[in-house]
Amino acid sequence: MKKILFKTEALKDTVMSYCPGCGHGVIHRLVAETIDELGIREKTIGIAPVGCAVFAYDYWNFDVTEAAHGRPPAVATGIKRVLPDRVVFTYQGDGDLIAIGTAETIHAANRGENITVIFVNNCVYGMTGGQMAPTTLIGQKTTTTPFGRDEKIAGYPIRVCELLSSLGGVTYLERVAVTDAKNIIKAKRAIKKAFQVQLDKKGFSLVEVLSSCPTDWGLNPQEAIEYIEKNMIPYFPLGVVKDKS
Amino acid sequence: MKKILFKTEALKDTVMSYCPGCGHGVIHRLVAETIDELGIREKTIGIAPVGCAVFAYDYWNFDVTEAAHGRPPAVATGIKRVLPDRVVFTYQGDGDLIAIGTAETIHAANRGENITVIFVNNCVYGMTGGQMAPTTLIGQKTTTTPFGRDEKIAGYPIRVCELLSSLGGVTYLERVAVTDAKNIIKAKRAIKKAFQVQLDKKGFSLVEVLSSCPTDWGLNPQEAIEYIEKNMIPYFPLGVVKDKS
Amino acid sequence: MAKRVLMKGNIAIGEGAIKANCKAYFGYPITPQNDLTAHMSKRMVELDRVFIQSESEIAAINMVFGAALTGARAMTSSSSPGISLKQEGISYMAGCELPGVILNVQRGGPGLGNISGAQGDYFQATRGGGHGDYRTLVLAPDSVQEMYDLVQEAFDLADKYRNPVVILIDGVLGQMMEPVDLEHDVKKYKLPPKDWILDGCKTREPRSIQSLYMKEGALEEHNWKLHEKYKKMKQDIKCETQHVDDAEIVLVAFGISARVCKSAMQLARKEGIKVGLIRPITLFPFPEEEILKATEHVKKFLVVEMNLGQMVEDVKLIINSKADVHFYGRPGGGLSSQEEIVNEISRIL
Amino acid sequence: MAKRVLMKGNIAIGEGAIKANCKAYFGYPITPQNDLTAHMSKRMVELDRVFIQSESEIAAINMVFGAALTGARAMTSSSSPGISLKQEGISYMAGCELPGVILNVQRGGPGLGNISGAQGDYFQATRGGGHGDYRTLVLAPDSVQEMYDLVQEAFDLADKYRNPVVILIDGVLGQMMEPVDLEHDVKKYKLPPKDWILDGCKTREPRSIQSLYMKEGALEEHNWKLHEKYKKMKQDIKCETQHVDDAEIVLVAFGISARVCKSAMQLARKEGIKVGLIRPITLFPFPEEEILKATEHVKKFLVVEMNLGQMVEDVKLIINSKADVHFYGRPGGGLSSQEEIVNEISRIL
Amino acid sequence: MQEEVIIAGFGGQGIMFMGTVLAHAAMQENKSVTFFPSYGAEMRGGTANCMIIMSDEDIGSPVVARPDGIIALNQPSADKFTRRIKEKGLLIVNSSLVTGESGRDDIKKVEVQATKIAEGLGDKRVANMVALGSYIKEVKILKLETLCKSLETLLGEKKKNLVDINIKALKDGYKL
Amino acid sequence: MQEEVIIAGFGGQGIMFMGTVLAHAAMQENKSVTFFPSYGAEMRGGTANCMIIMSDEDIGSPVVARPDGIIALNQPSADKFTRRIKEKGLLIVNSSLVTGESGRDDIKKVEVQATKIAEGLGDKRVANMVALGSYIKEVKILKLETLCKSLETLLGEKKKNLVDINIKALKDGYKL
Amino acid sequence: MSRITIDKEKCKGCGLCVLACPKNLIVMSDEFNKKGYHPASFSSGEDCTGCGFCFQVCPDVVIEVFK
Amino acid sequence: MSRITIDKEKCKGCGLCVLACPKNLIVMSDEFNKKGYHPASFSSGEDCTGCGFCFQVCPDVVIEVFK
Ligand SMILES: Cc1ncc(C[n+]2csc(CCOP(=O)(O)OP(=O)(O)O)c2C)c(N)n1
Ligand SMILES: Cc1ncc(C[n+]2csc(CCOP(=O)(O)OP(=O)(O)O)c2C)c(N)n1
Ligand code: SF4
Ligand code: SF4
Ligand code: SF4
Ligand code: SF4
Ligand code: SF4
Ligand code: SF4
Ligand SMILES: [Mg+2]
Ligand SMILES: [Mg+2]
């Protein structure tokens, strides 16, 4: 018998520090497999965010740096502009990417930086213990919306792909979810496409991945997947939002 | 004979420091007239930006503060939340509002802050001597795009109204231009509407005003008006972009 | 004795602020002060006051700026990296003479560092980490009770001087629990009328609040005025001293380091070493007189900090060769034990 | 004499950076350094290097972070409020040990202040205005030639120490023109190999660059290592002295204030007052020895700054009562004249 | 009198609650008390611990380097903290999960089948109270009664239904 | 020798260029020289001025408080700066725009119809060079030739067509 | 019949009112004002309709319209 | 015929693989692993198709699939 599915080279053989059932692990694997399949491991530089994925440099088997909270797109810009033939991507949570990092995200996208952004939307600040994120759903309880997110106080969950779609520099935007095997395979396809856009020097690509945070949602892993399906996907519809590639 | 058109109360009788032909003066007047017509001068707090309009507190005859560059929407939020029955508006340039202030703009809009934003788009950083703004047109020469804005280096001019339109908290967005009397009267209508939205407690309103900067465009006042008509309006189409009011 | 409540430092700050009639809290999550933000999200809403989780620390300080200019009491809190981001905003508040309370629950740095308690931001707090020659009052409580009390004073001091006040604690103080007497007497200050606020010009001429001074000499004049104000703040210096009178050596420490020093002092005294303690409670203005007075009979001072040596500069500037000033510090969240300090004392004596 | 070119200070910095093989410039407009950003927008593009006008100062410093971690020489420039915004980023660079050059063309503050030259950001530059106990090298040229020269050294020093270097000038130095010899000899440093960069793991094991140190004690260890590095920087102290040997009083000043002091010294000497000058060129590390040496025969020092007294603390910490230290300063963009300083000297003597 | 104790275990074992009950009771008995939680260096998972100091005098540092006592609810905690105990100090282990030698013969070791007893009571989550009861019995610094009252206060109205089983566990631990 | 001069006028009158030509020429004659521009406190409009120091020795502060000479191209500049001139100093005014008394009898005042002469030359923008020529004639610190060469260098290839008229203006000013 | 006034000392001479007037009633003066601008001037024609276009476009709000 | 392996010590017991397997070939063990989790375990059925669903959903990438 042949081993057909296993950890490929770009993912180190260590235990990741994520909670049981956390979506980050699957997304890490998808990124790693993509990089291996495209044969770009030795020319890739990844940028970990400040968020639960801050330790990504311990998991990926290629060059990785960690940027200040919200600044990965600026750091990526700095890297990519001086090394345009390397593959540069950021991996960011919803707090990182569209709260504190709003300006950096929008402007890297608008400049059409030839980078790839893997955007992990779990509707919550995971690392800091479950506060409201810009993507937290209306009515969702978090430690900073103890009565449920009230749009009158805290505004609306931001649909990042839709927000970015009007910007000239944006080439490819797709929203996926790592809920079940089928969706995970689709997510992989989107991620691979996003890297391909970069390899083809076509500009800014972003994949928004709906991902679970069982811990901060107070759900078990299975319930968390159901939560994505029942609550997140209806508000954050899956699919390609923009494709100029 | 009766005086039918003159400086109304909300505009002080001083000389504004703007260059000859600069659009800011007209827009100041439109805001002041709106405030007088709505009878809200005594309960209005304006927020001047860092930009050529930084001295607005010397021109308007009501309470005005000056915020750090890019932060007027956050300052407005602070004011409006503790004084919800006052009228709070920001007056911001393109650099202030959608470069350094991108995050503050987007999130105040998304929260549906019940404030009004007067957004003066002159495609350039006026105050600092004519650098590229996020709205600078492709090919436009500025002191920091000496060869003309090249989208490959500097990205695309951002259409602010279109960018904000997907956000849940946004109630009213319109783009106007202060080119000729007709458009100026339309601009006034839009500004008045935006304040009315606030008075009706309907949420975030923004009027984008295409405005001339003869000095930094290196044009005389008349040419500058033509520049708006020929170059800006085609890229930044006039009209209501969103109206949920 | 009044009823005591067991409370976390971070929460005590929040409850103290609420007692001081803080009308608006603006914050952005960051460890180790998250429980305060969470607490305020509940309490402020219950009390029909303002709570916003802002999009960033920068937005938060500028929201404080906005709320403060209406005369409302407002605060924000964060931890080291987030406080760095607020420096421009704090400078603006100082320039505009706006009151407001900023809590820094320090963690280890530089950069992302770690989430342990630390005292690496003393310079930033006391010398105005932002640009342009301004100062903030800096308060450094060392117990949960004092956090509860001092935050109330902080709001008064902010209003008294029309100046931002920084409360400098650290992850350990923020996270620890101690009993708190919620009815504890707190110093009340005589406050000037808020005759400078913007709330609409209904009953008066329009006003403006800004930090721009373009007329020749105007900014210099403004800065001299601020300078006078900073000097006047010396009225409100706060400092705790213990056993200085008979001391052979005096420890100087603030916040959590002072707590450790208190243990060290007890330990040393048990061993017969006469150790005293000076604990600056206001870090700016700094308690010069208390230290100077001690130099009259004490010739050895040991400054203990959870950093590589920051407050020690203020101590040296005052002592100016009137006594020996030693330093013991550990950076990056390393917390000294009382034994370490006693060893260091023995080494020096 | 080599051909001299008349050049603005800001431009000289840009041209010096280009000569030092700066590969990437990231900036955001702010007076009084706009001509540098404008100059780089042209020159870097012509040279096929990287120029980006970033969306903010924060983005700019983080772009420098990104470029620097690939091993490329990178810089950013701004003025006081913008530099405040960069403090978190600078702290991250220090934590990650990334080289890079940051120019602060100081203006009057706090807040928006004015656009005159000023020296209000000395504390921020020399004590790490950001969080967490780090330091940057700080260079303070006082002529256009020296700006051109020192920016080249700055890049070397940044690489030598893997540390950000701040160049601290002000609006006056930035805007003034003087002749510059573009072939002037500049000190070259022995530089370590850049064996830590991220550029893809083709020929080696993957690397990471980060400032997070969560393992117990790891951050403390890292910070002690940085501390050793900061101490080592003393090798590269730079300082100009004039007429100290026979001086009755020594002026201590940096940057534009030193220029005024040079005039004052000339004026005073004409009047028969023996005035000397010590001009720290590196503000961190600070030239302790030169000052200490002077105290052997000079008993009066006058520190002159365009602020309310910042470097004077460093001078006092060194002199530590070995001589009298006086201060003369003007804040908010007020520039003292040579006559004022001579008056002050007379008052002291 | 000054008593310093470290309570440690897995994240879900109610370590912080144990410490809080103890600290609260100490406060009720008018002692000086500090409680300091530590989630270790790791942000996710790993063991949690808290440090409580109870004293008749003012307390300096809330950080306990050399505890008088340790309550270890799981093996990693026992491994990590046992060697820190002061001479003649006390080690309470949850022997349902902690096996093996302490490696110290200068301390008193008390083994409590906390998890097992708790399971017997119908909810293994109250293992923490069993252990706490046992600790109180050993150190005799606070009255059992006070702890029961503190439990009531801290569980409050919302978790009133849990009061009984927790008190039962506490008492069972005490009685052992 | 040290000569300090302030050149002042409206924004559009070519003040900075005048100063640059002077500074450049001083450099060419191997003098120490500093040029310091000031746009006044106002950002927009108002008067502009620049300060030039030329010296045989190193120059300290580039800021000129008490100038040896002033070249005032408009009235506000004359009003503002005249009283700062050193005793026995020099005041050059563009008498086409500056009228009225200097109010000083301890200085030398030279009136030049700079704008008028420039208009005569066909471009009133070269009034600055007329005034500069006149200044050079008075202070005799630099050779007229050097200034002409500096003009050429500074106008460069792109503005070569303007060299002649500028030199003509300079010389006319000098000849007066 | 209508008319306008122009505050000549405050006029910055941008000329936009000249372009705006449908009746061509405004011209730029040859003289300078104190600020150094050539101010606009109303050629007191009878044709002024009081349409206010000149007022609308004047950036410095130095025109008043009477009707 | 296919099979999978599960690295029990690294498994965090989330149970997602159990749900994912269309053939219900995975169950959670009663024992703890060293980390204190109940790991998943493959019930070595003959039915395994090697579809890899279990692999796809495993957040900790502790499953390997053989075919
Ligand atoms: C300047 C700054 N502000 C705040 C923080 C604290 N912080 C760390 S992670 C985080 C949010 C993480 O949420 P998200 O980006 O959604 O990532 P997740 O953990 O959910 O994957 C915050 C606010 C910080 N480290 N730095
Ligand atoms: C933090 C900070 N960065 C930069 C500046 C400098 N600055 C002042 S105004 C301005 C831009 C003004 O452009 P815009 O907002 O478009 O207004 P305009 O002058 O065009 O009306 C800039 C970059 C500043 N004052 N503060
Ligand atoms: S907190 Fe949430 S996002 Fe973070 S590791 Fe745990 S489950 Fe994943
Ligand atoms: S620079 Fe431009 S925007 Fe600023 S006042 Fe002049 S014309 Fe107006
Ligand atoms: S009111 Fe109308 S007609 Fe009269 S001057 Fe003005 S633009 Fe012309
Ligand atoms: S529009 Fe106004 S400022 Fe412009 S020329 Fe006419 S009157 Fe003067
Ligand atoms: S490979 Fe498919 S059939 Fe086999 S165990 Fe996994 S999910 Fe079940
Ligand atoms: S999905 Fe992976 S981690 Fe989860 S139970 Fe199955 S094997 Fe274990
Ligand atoms: Mg998240
Ligand atoms: Mg603009």
Image: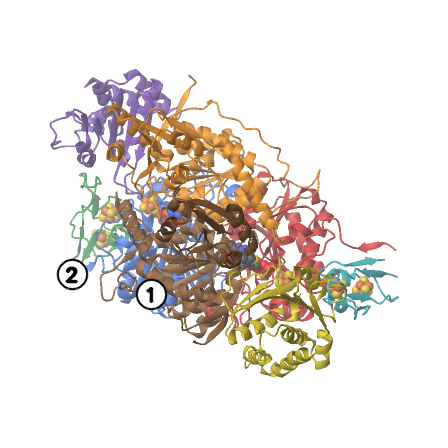
Chain colours: A red, B blue, C brown, D orange, E yellow, F purple, G green, H cyan
Give the letter of the chain under mark 1: B
Q: Could you tell me the amino acid type at mark 2? A: Lys
**Residue nearest the observer in this picture, B101 or C57:** C57
| Res C33 seen here | no
Q: Residue E162 appears at what percent x and percent y?
A: 62, 81
Q: Are marks 1 and 2 on the same chain?
A: yes
Q: Would you say the beta carbon of the disc 1 residue lies within 8 angstroms of ligand 2?
A: no
Q: Using the image, tell me which numbered label, if any, was put on residue B87.
A: 1
* Nearer to us in this view, D198 or F135: D198
Q: In this orientation, does residue H64 appear? A: yes
Residue B56 vs C149, above or below: the answer is above
The image quarter containing residue E163 is: bottom right
- Res B2 label: 2
Q: In which quarter of the image is residue D139?
A: top left
Q: In this view, does G64 lie to the left or right of C311?
A: left
Is D309 on the left or on the right of D221, as rendered?
Answer: left
Image coordinates of residue H41 in percent, x first then y, are 81, 66
> Dot 2: few (<14), some (14–19), or many (≥20) neighbours within 10 Å?
few
Residue A155 vs C324, above or below: the answer is below
Distance between mark 1 and mark 2 Cα atoms: 31 Å
Q: What element carries label 1?
A: strand
Question: Could you tell me which residue is drawn at 36 percent across and 38 percent down?
Answer: D171
Query: Of the residues shown, which amino acid type is indicated by label 1?
Result: Val
User: Badge 2 sits on which subunit?
Assistant: B
How far across and down, in percent of the image, does residue H17 sit? 76, 65
For this view, does E46 lie left or right of residue H18? left
Question: Where is C71 relative to D314, above or below?
Answer: below
> Which quadrant is the N terminus of chain C positioned in?
bottom left
